[in-house]
Amino acid sequence: MINKIKKTSLLLVITSLAFLYQNCALVKNAGTTSANSDSAASLSSTLEQKAMGVLAAKCMGCHNAKNPQGYLDVTNLNSMLYYRQVVPGEPQLSNIFYEITQGLMPPDQNSALSQSDIAILSDWITNGFKDGTPTVTAPSGPPLTATYSSIKSQIFVVSCNGCHSGANAKAGVSLDSYDNVMKTVTAGNSAASVLYKAIIGDGVTLMPPGGGMSAKQKSAIKDWIDTGALLN
């Protein structure tokens, strides 16, 4: 009888120790997860602060809330994400990074970004969103018009440049600059323009894939081409 009680007591002690160990492990893992999350958030914040410092110094004079030339406001992260100026994890697909590294921006090369500045932007775009990309909403901004700058920022950057930009542009069609866009356009004649044929699916694959463009977007591109496809 005594031996049976001892065995029962020993079993209870072992069970209790196992339970305590399991709970300690859970608490430790929870603490580790929380620490990792805090570390990622801290890194993202640091990288964003550095990047915004570069953009403020080199770009904000022309691209701010009151004067968003090319519809680009570098003080508005939501807008930059929506218009694919910044594509988290993908510097080469980010329009703002592409234009800077290609020497297209800033237009005054005396104000060009240093390699250190470019590295800061690259690091931010690559690693600054690993704690989660912020929720992006359609920004309230100027209406779409039949001008190149409006079509570029509100259509090409958002719906086209993910596939049609840079050295590896799909089908060899790049829409990342005015000169490249004009390779697909016959000024004054939308019906003869490869760009317009693609967005209405006239004899070629409908673009963008998965639904194409809205009637308003098609109309803006058509009107821009038919009025001369100016760099406006």
Image (tube, rainbow, N blue to C red):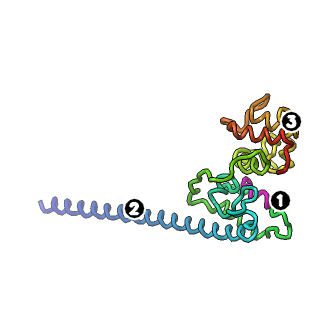
The local crowd at label 3, few if under 14, some if 14 to 19, many if 20 or more residues have their Cα within 10 Å, is: some
Is label 3 or label 2 in front?
Answer: 3
Question: Which range of residues does the magenta coloring cover?
Answer: 92-103
Percent coordinates x, y for residue 197 in the rendering:
79, 33
Which secondary structure class fits the magenta region best? helix
**Does residue 202 lie above or below 27 as drawn?**
above
User: Where on the picture, by quarter, is residue 122?
Assistant: bottom right
* Front residue (pair 76, 163): 76
Looking at the rendered structure, the secondary structure element under dot 1 is loop
Q: Distance between the residues labelled 1 and 2?
A: 53 Å
Q: Where is residue 183 in the image (x, y as percent from the top left)?
A: 87, 43
Looking at marks 1 and 3 on the same chain, the residue that comes earlier in the sequence is marked by 1
Q: Residue at x 83, y 58 (%)?
A: 102
- Identity of the amino acid at label 3? Asn
Q: Which numbered circle lies on residue 104?
A: 1
Q: Would you name the residue on which mark 3 appears? A: 189
Q: How far separated are the C-alphas under marks 1 and 3?
A: 28 Å
Instruction: Give the residue displayed 69% in from the left and 55% down from the top.
Output: 90
Query: Residue drawn at (69%, 60%), measured in percent from left and top?
Result: 73
What's the residue at 69%, 36% (across, down)? 215
Q: Which of marks 1 and 3 is in front?
A: 3
Which of label 1 and label 2 is nearer to you?
1
Per the rendering, the mark at residue 26 is 2
